Image (cartoon, rainbow, N blue to C red):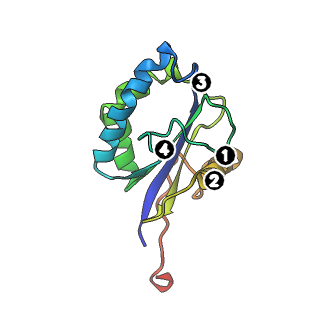
Amino acid sequence: MDFHLAQLNIGRLLHPLDHPRIQEFVDGLDHINALADQWPGFVWRLQTDSGNATDVQHPWSRDPFLLVNMSVWKSPEDLKQFVYRSGHLEYYLKRSEWFEKPSEAHYVLWWAPEGHIPNLEEARQRLEHYRAHGASQHAFWFGKLFPAPEVSAAAV
């Protein structure tokens, strides 16, 4: 069994999505999502019929300013390349213009069996575990990556 890297990232907007100060972020969503969809190593991303996840109902709160981003990648390197070596970087560097500075961990990584699409409750549990216990095989971040689980031949 192979594993893919799942990621969850949450952020709270400084203004409503229809506010002029958020317009550049909103205008870039289709472009960045299309870039991700075609990026080497991309597997899946959370989205609704809108094509993005800005209207996803999530298990954290009913706060309309809280946005979630969740995706699955073949490897940590694939995700890193997308985040830091694509057109995404320009938007990543401007995040403080659109989102509040997080007061606690706002993203988490974990290994998901190939073919498994994580749901938001699973992602919430991973983030809460990371916040409570720090990096572990169960939930980690780029600064402390854990290798994918090894499955013994007897278990297959």
- Disc 4 or 1, which lies upstream in sequence? 1
Image point (68%, 36%), residue name: 62
- Disc 4 or 3, which lies upstream in sequence? 3
Distance between mark 1 and mark 2 Cα atoms: 6 Å
- Disc 1 or 3, which lies upstream in sequence? 1
- Disc 1 or 2, which lies upstream in sequence? 1
Q: Position of residue 89 (x, y in %)?
A: 36, 30
Quadrant of the rendered image containing residue 93: top left
SS for callout 1: loop
Res. 127 in view:
yes
SS for callout 4: loop
Looking at the rendered structure, the kind of residue marked 1 is Pro
Image point (68%, 42%), residue name: 60
Local packing at callout 1 (Cα closer than 10 Å; few below 14, some 14-19, many 20+) is few
Judge by depth and name the residue closer to the eye, 48 or 69: 48
Pointer 3 residue: 101
Quadrant of the rendered image containing residue 50: top left
Q: Position of residue 152 (x, y in %)?
A: 48, 79
Looking at the rendered structure, the kind of residue marked 4 is Phe
Q: Which mark is residue 59?
A: 1
Distance between mark 1 and mark 3 Cα atoms: 21 Å
- Residue furthest to the top in view is 20
Looking at the rendered structure, the kind of residue marked 3 is Lys
SS for callout 3: loop
Distance between mark 2 and mark 4 Cα atoms: 22 Å
Looking at the rendered structure, the kind of residue marked 2 is Glu
Instruction: Tell me the quarter of the image containing the N terminus.
Output: bottom left
Pointer 4 residue: 142
Judge by depth and name the residue closer to the eye, 42 or 30: 30
Res. 93 in view:
no
Pointer 2 residue: 121
Q: Nearer the viewer, mark 1 or mark 3?
A: 1
